[in-house]
Every structure is written in structure tokens, then in C-alpha cells.
Amino acid sequence: MRLNPRYFFMEALISLRRNWLMSVAAISTVAILLFIVGLFSFLIYNARAVIEAIERQVEISVYLKDDLSPPARDALEEEIRSWEEVRSVKYISKEQALEIFIETVGEDSDIVKGLSGNPLPASFEISLKDPKTVETVANRFLQENGDHREGVDDLRYGQEYVRKLFSITTVLGIIIGLVILLLFFSALILIYNTIRLAIYARRKEVEVMRLVGASNWFITWPFILEGIIEGVAGGAIAILLVWMTNSFLLIPVEEVIVSALHIRTLALTGSEPIQLQVFTMILVVGASIGAVGSGVALRRFLRV
């Protein structure tokens, strides 16, 4: 029998209209579950962006001895720049350090008024390509006996803070991955069961088609197209709900977090690339689950 895509598509639409109550139930289930999955996807993007932004703020401050000569300082700076882990190096002179300090505490501060001369050292501010290499780079400023290398008076990068931060981010990464898998499989099972119930309610229709000699593919295709239509329709509704929630709730909350944590760079969940990724994922997952769920659920009624 010749397969006619238009015929199958029209049969799917007729079936949706004829069994509109079950179709509404399936579409609603898909929409609600994909809305939850999409919403959590935005929250996960948000959490990852905040974590990565905080990690990017991890820097190494290398304080130099006052008697370090300019040629030795330049040589040290050149060496630091040559390390592959280093993104950038900024030299801050004693004078610049004092200016920054005065701007921070204010000119009228008792501390500033009590200063005699400039007690602040010059320093290098080092940012890294991968914050997790911070201890590797910091150890290069130490000798085997634990003392600082020549010309270096001290270095700071918040050792304990960095260790705790990376431990937290590792655990969060595992939790986020498990949440994604749990949500996806929960959605898959619930949507599959909804579609299976819809097909079970029409088992007599399948039996009649088999009795008149229709092939398995001839019976299956309208149901698969019906599942795809229900999945896409549910996905479209989910996208609308996710967009509204993201625009009127998540983005304003995110802006408050950015301001409170003084994060310098953060990919907002309102950015078009992130929205496009999540919305495309919702449609693809909806259509895929609808098609696969219909095909698998129908198999039991097509067994000889």
C-alpha cells in the first residue's frame, strides 16, 4: 500500500478532533511537564552562570618587596605572562595601591590621616583562564622550603575560600546533572503513560483496522503524527509559560543577585541564545516524546 503523508496527517487531525478530550489531557500533561523542565533549565543556566562568574573573580595578588629592582620586576612579569594558565597580569605600583586604598576607605578616614608615607607594596594582580589552576600558579611563587621566591613578599588568593568554593561547585554540578536526568525521565514516563491511556481508549479502532487488513505502518503513522502534534502543541504552550515566568520573575530576581554579589560578568537568562536553546529543546523533546510514546504504546496492540 502506497504511503500518503497528507492522508496520514489529515487522519491525525481528524483523530485529534474526534478524541478531543484525551488530546487535551495529553497536551496539558506535555505542557505542564515541559514547563517544569524548561523552567528548571533556566534556573540551572542561572546557577551555572553565577558559579562561573564567581569563579572568574578568583585572582592571585602577588605583593612585591620594596627593594625589587625595575628590571627584576619586568622579568618576573614577563615570566608570569608566559605561563599558559594566565589570562592577564596587571601591575599595580605603590602609588596606585595607595590611591585605590584612599578611594576605598575615603580621604577623611582616620586610617588615611594616620598614614606616614606609603606603607603599601606594589603588586601583580593575576587572573587565570581556569580558576581551578589557582593553586598550581600560586605554588610557583614558593620555594621548596615554603618561603616566597626572590622579590616576592607575600601572595593572597583566599586559599580556604577557593577550596570551599570549588568543593561547592563540584557538588552543585553533580546535583544539577541528577536533577536534569530526574526531571527528563519523570516527564518521559508521565507523558508516555498519558499517550498510552489515550491509545488504550481507542484499542477497538486499532483492532478493526487490523481486521480489514491494514498494515502495521498504516495503523501506526497517524498515531505517531498525532503524538508529534500533541507534543509540539504542549511544547508551544510550555514555551509561552516559561517565557512569561522568565521575563517577569527569573530575570528581575537574577538582576538582584548580580547586584548583591557584585558579579562583574554574568550571562543573563534573558539573553537570546539561552532562550533559543531552551525553547528549541522544549519543542524537540515534546515532539520526540510524542512520537516515541505513541509508537511504543501502540506496539502492544499490533502484536499478532
Image (cartoon, rainbow, N blue to C red):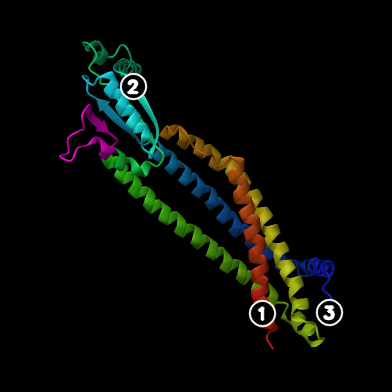
Q: Name the image quarter holding the C terminus.
A: bottom right
Q: Nearer the viewer, mark 1 or mark 3?
A: 3
Tell me the mark number nearer the camera, choosing from 2 and 1.
2
Task: Establish if 34 lies above or below 163.
Answer: below
Q: Which mark is residue 125?
A: none
Is 73 placed above or below 42 here? above
Residue pictured at 22% horizontal, 30% vertical = 154
- Disc with the residue nearer the chain's start (3 vs 2): 3
Image quadrant assignment for residue 237: bottom right
Q: CA distance from mark 3 to mark 2?
A: 80 Å
Q: Position of residue 28 (x, y in %)?
A: 66, 61
Magenta region: which residues? 138-158
In the figure, is residue 268 to the left or right of 4? left
How packed mark 2 is, by other alpha carbons closer than 10 Å (few <14, some 14-19, many 20 or more), is: some
Q: Which residue is mark 3?
A: 1
Q: Quadrant of residue 269?
A: top right
Mark 2 or 1 closer to N-term? 2
Is 62 in front, or is 243? Answer: 62
Q: Amino acid at mark 3?
A: Met
Q: CA distance from mark 1 to mark 3?
A: 20 Å
Asked whether the beta carbons under mark 2 and mark 1 sit within 8 Å of each other, the answer is no
Q: Which residue is mark 2?
A: 92
Name the secondary structure under disc 3.
Answer: loop
